[in-house]
Image (cartoon, rainbow, N blue to C red):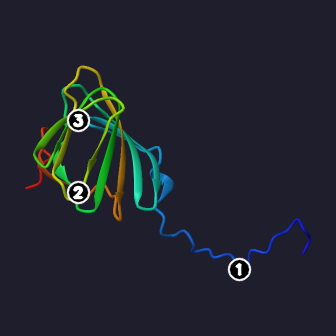
Amino acid sequence: MSSLTQDFSTVDTNKNLSCPPQSEVGLSDDRPWGSYTVLEVGPNYKIKRIEVKPGHRLSLQMHHHRSEHWIVVSGTAKVTCDGDEKIIYTNQSTYVPQGTRHRLENPGVIPLMLIEVQNGEYLGEDDIVRYQDDYARAND
C-alpha cells in the first residue's frame, strides 16, 4: 500500500450505533407556551434553547428517565420544583432532579430564553407525565 491509501478492512463499523441520532439537531417545535430548538444531542444528553412567552407556563410535569438543568439567558423564570417556588434571573440556573414534579413559568413582560441540558439514559419527548396543563394536555 502506498502512503496515500488506508486499509479500512479492520474498522469497526458498529462502533457508534448507541449514540443518539444527530438528525434532531436544529429541530424546532412551536408549542402553545412558546418554542424550543434542539442545539445538540449526545450519549445521555440533549441541549435545547427554550423560549417561553410572557405570562405563559409549561405543564406541571415529571420525567421518569431524565434530569434537567436550566440556565436563564434572558428574562425571568418562575420555577416550581416539588412544590417549592423560586425566581431565577438572567445568568442564574437551577437543577430539576429525575422524578421531580416541576413547572417553568414566565412571569415577566419579555420572552424568557433559557438553555436546557437534559441528562439521562432515555431522552424521548414521550417521557413526560403531565399533572396540570393550561392547554388541556394533562394525563388522565
How many residues crowd mark 3 within 10 Å: few (<14), some (14–19), many (20+)?
A: few
Instruction: Give SS at disc 2.
Output: loop
Return the x and y of residue 91 as percentages of the image width and height. 36, 32
Relative to 102, is 108 above or below?
above
Task: Kindly identify the amino acid type of the residue bearing the numbered disc 3.
Answer: Pro
- Residue furthest to the right in view is 2
Count residues near mark 2 (Cα–Cα under 10 Å), then give few for <14, some for 14-19, many for 20+: many
Q: Which residue is mark 1?
A: 10
Identity of the residue drawn at 18% across and 36% down:
86
Tell me the residue at 29%/58% (across/down): 66
Whole-number angstrom distance, CA of label 3 to CA of label 1: 51 Å
Of tags 2 and 3, the one toward the viewer is: 2
Badge 3 marks a residue whose secondary structure is: loop
Residue 32 disc label: 3
Please give the residue where the numbered disc 2 appears in the rendered image.
63
- Marks 1/2 in contact by CB < 8 Å: the verdict is no
Residue 73, quarter of the rendered image: top left
Amino acid marked by disc 1 = Thr
Image quarter hosting the N terminus:
bottom right
Structural crowding at the residue carrying mark 1, measured as other residues with C-alpha within 10 Å and reported as few (<14), some (14–19) or many (≥20):
few
Label 2 sits on what residue type?
His
Q: Earlier in the sequence, mark 1 or mark 2?
A: 1
